[in-house]
Amino acid sequence: MAEQYRLATLSDAEELLYLTHRAYAPVRELGLPFPAATASLEMVQDNIYKNAVYVAEDNSEMIATITIIYPWGPTHDSSGLPYLWWFAVEPERKKQGIGSRLLTWIEETILRDTLKAPAVTLATSIYHPWLIPMYERRGYEKVKKVELENDTVYFLRKVLNHELLKELTEKESVS
């Protein structure tokens, strides 16, 4: 594998949309209301414009993507931590560790080492049959359950730097 990781640009939007729709086909079959499953080109462009959308490529072929929503952006929780979403892997390339390698790179290189984030969050439907166990195997822990209009989700958190999280928690408890 000669995978390369980079930030997506607006010129990647159509290819990202195509990848995302193929990758989220099982989610549509489950009837889960994941925004990425039915995204429009405009939604993908908006995601690229407002957030950090990373792609994995192999020989210039886009094979996976994940988005980081920063705490100062339109976050999906109130933790003050980066939030991951729109994680997708090319269906023909699943079960090859591509998604795992991309997620590890995002967690360690971008979030922990570059941005010094103490932890990261994400959310997924409690009705999705394999995502929660997959994230738990990667060290994510359930932190809250939220009832939405059309779904119930767990917010999960993974600690990336225990010392930084401890310092942040101590500062918040003093405030």
Image: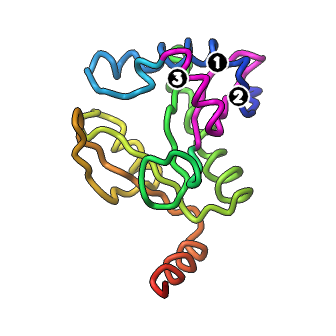
Dividing the picture into quarters, in which one does residue 118 lie? Answer: bottom right
User: Which residue is labeled 2 in the image?
Assistant: 8
Percent x, y for residue 86? 50, 32
For label 1, the crowd category at 10 Å Cα-Cα, with few meaning under 14, some 14 to 19 and many 20 or more, is many
Q: What element does badge 1 sit on?
A: helix
Residue at 62% x, 39% y is 51
In three-dimensional space, the C-alpha distance between marks 2 and 1, rounded to whole angstroms, equals 8 Å
Amino acid type, label 1: Ala
Could you tell me which residue is drawn at 34 percent across and 22 percent down? 27
Q: Which mark is residue 13?
A: 1
- Which span is picked out in magenta? 40-68
Question: Element under label 2?
Answer: loop
Nearer-the-camera pick, 40 or 135: 40
Q: How is the image coloured?
A: rainbow
Crowd rating for badge 2 (residues with CA inside 10 Å; few <14, some 14–19, many 20+): many
Q: CA distance from mark 3 to mark 1?
A: 9 Å
Q: Position of residue 136 (x, y in %)?
A: 39, 50
Q: Earlier in the sequence, mark 2 or mark 3?
A: 2
Mark earlier in primary sequence (2, 1): 2
Q: Residue at x 64, y 30 (%)?
A: 48
Report how far apart the C-alphas of labels 2 and 3 lie in the structure. 14 Å
- Residue 119's x, y, as percent? 54, 61
Instruction: Looking at the image, tell me whether mark 3 or mark 1 is earlier in sequence order.
Output: 1
Please state which amino acid type lies under the numbered disc 2.
Ala
Can you identify the residue that label 3 sits on? 43
Judged from the image, the secondary structure of the residue bearing numbered disc 3 is helix
| Amino acid type indicated by mark 3 | Met
Q: Residues within 10 Å of mark 3 (few under 14, many from 20)?
A: some
